[in-house]
Amino acid sequence: MSWLTDDDDEPEFDEADIRMRPNPKANRPRTKRRPAHNDARIGRVLGVDRGRYTVLLDEDTDDEHEVSSVRARELRKQPIVTGDHARIVGDTSGDVGSLSRIVGIEERVTLLRRSADDTDQVERIIVANADQMLVVVAAADPEPRARLVDRYLVAALDAGIRPLLVVTKTDIADPTDFLTHFDGLDLDVFTSSRGEMPLERIGAALVGHSTVFVGHSGVGKSTLVNALVPSALRATGHVNTVTGRGRHTSSSTVSLRYRGEGGSGWVIDTPGVRSFGLGHVDPRHIIDAFTELALIAETCPRGCTHLPDAPDCAIIEAVQAGRLGPTGAARLDSLQRLLATFADPRRSSQD
């Protein structure tokens, strides 16, 4: 209560006059300070399903096991994807019904991304920390799309990921003409037919690496994954005879352990896509993948596009003068094709 003093008739107050608003939840007020989680354990994110993350702890040890995790509140705006190395707290036993919490993501080495189309600057993260990309195409049924493969290659080079190429269904059609499109690229190519998958050769390329498999729906990507990792049990589909399109069978991105005679590696299977936007790509990363051409490009005029109509391009002049040997022209053609794929906004992301 308040009262008037005899001296100056001014009101005075005491502590009892201050009205406090009760805390209806009877809990402590929120703070922006977060615990350091110094006891957090590091695990590999194997997959994501409806807000639950499967994380592998104690990798390559006798105590290796999977745990189910949720995202901490402070990470609600942080994308967490397959391949991430996550910091885990809580119940990490992996027992039935146990649940841990992801409180942080370790720095990523690589990040494979795509956009909805070439004008879209919003990126979709596909996988983190992969060091190889295995592009799977079919020689026929559906027909191979060289421009879509170009887009995969551009995204891989931008991310600093080594690309590989597998052509399936070579018993249906000869892929020779299609493969000439990639002459001059430093690209390992594997061909596969029904009953004759080069599993040993492909498997040898997977050992010691984290390899993301990408490809158009219906090209046999999931069939190849199941052959390499029999326990994967990835769903396989067929190609629609009317539209020529494959049906999406893999609905999520998952990491699978590959075990071969030469060692182990990681196979990251992704859903099939029919488009691959490059709105996020830095074109400088494309030429960096062509080491000998990148050195010559340092003497090009500022802003040189290196495309056929580029004036005073040092790379074009070097090829015309024969200074890059018999493969120089093919290498330049491959570089120009990839740069054109990225640079022309009229090209569809489904080309």
Image (cartoon, helix red, strand yellow):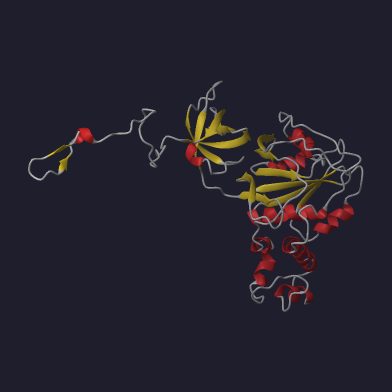
Q: Residue pushed farthest left?
A: 7
Furthest toward the top, the residue is 96
Residue 121 image offset from top left, x and y in percent = 64, 55
* In this rendering, position of residue 28 left or right of residue 65: left
At 74% from the left and 75% from the top, the residue drawn is: 310
Q: Quadrant of residue 15?
A: top left
Asked if residue 269 lies left or right of residue 33, the reply is right
Q: How many marks?
A: 0
- Left or right of 18 in this view: 83: right
In the rendered view of the protein, which quadrant contains the C terminus?
bottom right
Looking at the picture, tell me which residue is in the foreground, 2 or 325.
2
Where, quadrant-wise, is the N terminus in this rendering?
top left
**Res 334 quadrant in image:** bottom right
- Of the pair 154 and 316, the residue shown nearer to us: 154
Measured from the top left, where is residue 144 in percent x and y? 85, 49
Residue 327 in the image, given as x and y percentages of width and height: 79, 65
Residue that appears at 82% across and 42% down: 219
Residue 295 percent coordinates (x, y): 65, 69
Image height of 284 relative to 9, above or below: below
Toward the bottom, the furthest residue is 312
Name the side, left or right, on which 64 lies relative to 206: left
Q: Is residue 260 above or below residue 348?
A: above
At 54% from the left edge and 44% from the top edge, which residue is drawn?
78
In percent of the image, x 89 and y 45: which residue is there?
A: 140
Q: Between 232 and 191, which is closer to the camera in this rendering?
A: 232
